[in-house]
Image (tube, rainbow, N blue to C red):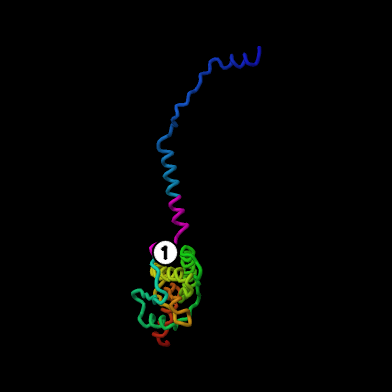
Amino acid sequence: MKEDDLFASEMADVTRHRPSGKVALRRGAADNTSLQQRRDAAVTAAETDRNLLAEHGVEPLDHWYVLDFKRPGVQNGVFRKLKQGRYEAEARLDLHRMSVERARREVFEFFEEAQRLGLRTVLLIHGKGESRADQERASILKGCCQAWLPQMDCVMAFHSARPQQGGTGAVIVLLRKSEEQKQANREHFRKGRIGPD
């Protein structure tokens, strides 16, 4: 017997399968998997970008405009000292030549780090836009600072810097005290009230 005849005899009772073009789905299992995948993706996306600073809709500001903000509860004397430049900046971030997207990321990370380190005053340099090419970028970054800083809970107050710190091309920022700093203040003042035994 030839091979072809052998193959034909073995395949004689086999019927040809005709695909219907439809895929049979098990209801429930596939839907649950895709729903879980969407939930996981949403959680992952939220974790990767914790930055809540607005990306769009920021108005550019004139380079002579004075930035000024104070949260309720900040004492007037403390704010006056901030405006007068009597607090030394413990750290600074220079935004010159940055895009809005990069500045947004840098500002958020800078303030997170400053808060983690327990810093109280920082300087943010956005620039004045002295040259014609820099004017538009600097005024946008200044507008971003005006919009972004109040969005951060750690920022208690800010004001355009004194001329020696950068003037209206920079902003001095007062940060919220850490819990450790608050506790140290309480202990310091408590010692002053309690007399020697």
What residue do we see at 50% from left, 72% from top? 94
Q: Amino acid at mark 1?
A: Leu
Q: Is residue 120 above or below residue 152?
A: below
Residue 110: give x, y in percent of width and height: 49, 69
Q: Position of residue 142 (x, y in %)?
A: 43, 71
Residue drawn at 43 percent across, 51 percent down: 42
Q: Where in the figure is residue 13, as x and y percent of width and height? A: 53, 15
Quadrant containing the C terminus in the rendered view? bottom left
Instruction: Residue under label 1, please give it.
Output: 53
Residue that appears at 33% across and 74% down: 72
Task: State yes or no: residue 128 in magenta.
Answer: no
Residue 104: percent from left, percent from top: 46, 65
The extreme left residue here reads: 72
Total tally of numbered discs in the picture: 1
Whether residue 84 is visible, yes or no, is yes
Q: Is residue 118 visible?
A: no
Q: Residue furthest top?
A: 1
Graded by Cα atoms within 10 Å as few (under 14), some (14 to 19) or many (20 or more), the crowding at tag 1 reads some
Spot the residue most to the bottom: 196
Magenta-colored span: 41-57
- Relative to residue 163, is residue 10 drawn left or right? right
Position of the N terminus by quadrant: top right
Q: Is residue 44 magenta?
A: yes
Q: Secondary structure at mark 1?
A: loop
Q: Please identify the quarter of the rendering in which residue 175 is found.
A: bottom left
